[in-house]
Image (cartoon, rainbow, N blue to C red):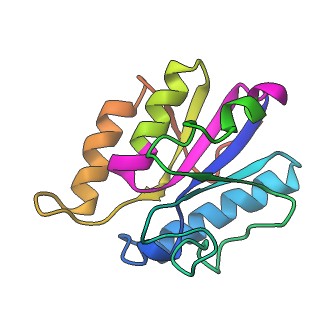
Amino acid sequence: MAKALIVIDMQNALSKLDQREHVIATINKRIDQYHQAKLPVIFIQHTEPEMEVASKNWQLFDSLHALGTDTFYNKTRPDAFYQTGLESFLKMNHLDSIEICGAQVEFCVDTTIRVAYHLGFTIDLLIDGITTMDSNLLTAQQIKQHHAQIWNHRFAEFVTTTSPIN
């Protein structure tokens, strides 16, 4: 089954992400594995008034292993598929199985997982490669655990950096 890695919203505006450096290291390990296997790596970047395209807040974290040959999409909604061209890219390249990682769990990661599922994609989730920030009600870890319980074996299968990618 074809594969692509989708990295969601790992941008400077989200500098207070829980366990940010650990999550970036995990994502980088997976990015390197996809690059080595010559499989697509797709970066999704959110845009809004505080994150204008090309601004410092919009830019990816400098430590991410993004290459100029990777694919990049801007989005204006939590759904990485909404008016971005992502679905067309995946279908045109016969990529029916995707792996998702990034931020924020309860917004863009959750929405993208559910939409991808609805569109018929098989989804793996890099479980140690997702994060968010504490809310007024829940810690970042509680938010992640809550969503993981909903996603697991329903919308996605969990993978780690030791899981095979193809």
Q: In the figure, 54 relative to 86: above or below?
A: below
* Residue 148 appears left or right of 61: left
* Residue 158 appears left or right of 72: left
Quadrant containing the N terminus is top right
Q: How many labels does the image show?
A: 0
How far across and down, in percent of the image, does residue 120 sit?
Answer: 59, 18
Q: Which residue lies furthest to the front in this view?
A: 49
How far across and down, in percent of the image, does residue 99 sit?
Answer: 62, 41
Name the residue: 42% across, 38% down: 111
Q: In which quarter of the image is residue 136?
A: bottom left
Q: In the figure, 71 relative to 134: above or below?
A: above
Name the residue: 22% across, 54% down: 142
* Residue 22 appears left or right of 66: left
Q: Can residue 61 be seen in this view?
A: yes
- Considering depth in this image, is 43 or 163 the residue closer to the camera? 43
Q: Give the range drawn in magenta.
A: 91-109
- Considering depth in this image, is 7 or 164 the residue closer to the camera? 7
Q: Does the magenta stretch include residue 92?
A: yes
Name the residue: 81% across, 67% down: 67
Q: In which quarter of the image is residue 152?
A: top left
